[in-house]
Structures are given as structure tokens and as C-alpha cells.
């Protein structure tokens, strides 16, 4: 009997939601080479995602940078809540109520 066949799996193409999730890390230069290539392939064919990426770049350039220490505690908690809701996690405000 012959040896086992080696099958090289190709990564599946990104859908827009996956592309959007990678964009911040892409702009920060924090993506792996593989994810960078996948995102750039998607951007080459998706005008909507290219537009969204340019909007992110513009927002970053206009707003400068802000760290957690630059925000009022209530504003930081609200941002954390929004992020956790996006990711499907618990609200930060409910955690703060128990502190």
C-alpha cells in the first residue's frame, strides 16, 4: 500500500467581518505574515473593506492617541463595556458594582 497522501490546506478567504476584526492589528503591524497576506488579498477585492480601512486610518490620524490614563474612569468603563459587548463578554459595569 502507498503512503498517506499529503494534502496542503489553503486558508479559507476572509469574509468582511473577519477582515474588520484584523484591521487594528494590521495598522499596528501586529498581524502574522499569514493573516497580513489574507487581509491584503481580501482588501484587493473588497471596496467596502478598503473604504473602512481608510476611515480607520483617518480617524487615527485626526484623533491622535489616547491611553487608559488619559480617560476619565467613567469613559474608560464605557469603552470596556462596548468592547465586551462586541466580544460577547460580561459588562464591566456589573464587575465594578461588586468592587
Image (spheres, rainbow, N blue to C red):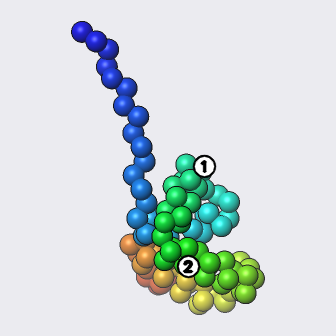
Quarter of the figure with residue 51: bottom right
Mark 1 nearby-residue class (10 Å; few <14, some 14–19, many ≥20): few
- Mark 2 vs mark 1: in front: 2
Q: Is residue 67 left or right of residue 19?
A: right
Between 83 and 12, the one nearer to me in the picture: 12
Q: Residue at x 66, y 77 (%)?
A: 57
Measured from the top left, where is residue 25 in percent x and y? 61, 64
The correct choice, above or below, for 37 with respect to 5 in the image is below
Q: How many marks?
A: 2
Q: Which mark is residue 33?
A: 1
Measured from the top left, where is residue 37 in percent x and y? 56, 53
Camera sees residue 22: no
For the residues labelled 2 and 1, say whether their Cβ atoms are less than 8 Å apart. Answer: no
Under circle 2, the secondary element is helix
Between 21 and 9, the one nearer to me in the picture: 9
Q: Which mark is residue 94?
A: none
Q: Residue at x 58, y 74 (%)?
A: 53
Under circle 1, the secondary element is helix
Q: Residue at x 60, y 89 (%)?
A: 75
Q: Who comes first in sequence, dot 2 or dot 1?
A: 1
- Which quadrant does the N terminus fall into? top left
Quarter of the figure with residue 91: bottom left
Mark 2 nearby-residue class (10 Å; few <14, some 14–19, many ≥20): few
Q: Residue at x 55, y 83 (%)?
A: 79
Q: Is residue 69 left or right of residue 84?
A: right
Q: Which mark is residue 51?
A: 2
Q: Is residue 38 left or right of residue 13?
A: right
The correct choice, above or below, for 18 with respect to 2 in the image is below
Measured from the top left, where is residue 2 in percent x and y? 28, 12
The correct choice, above or below, for 94 with respect to 43 in the image is below
Camera sees residue 20: yes
Amino acid at each position: 500500500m502507498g503512503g498517506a497522501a499529503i494534502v496542503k490546506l489553503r486558508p479559507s478567504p476572509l469574509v468582511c467581518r473577519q477582515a474588520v476584526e484584523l484591521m487594528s492589528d494590521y495598522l499596528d503591524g501586529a498581524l502574522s505574515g499569514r493573516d497580513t497576506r489574507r487581509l491584503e488579498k481580501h482588501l484587493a477585492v473588497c471596496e467596502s473593506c478598503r473604504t473602512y480601512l481608510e476611515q480607520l486610518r483617518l480617524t487615527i490620524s485626526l484623533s491622535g492617541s489616547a491611553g487608559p490614563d488619559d480617560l476619565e474612569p467613567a469613559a474608560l468603563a464605557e469603552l470596556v463595556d462596548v468592547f465586551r459587548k462586541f466580544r460577547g463578554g460580561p459588562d464591566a459595569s456589573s464587575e465594578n458594582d461588586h468592587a
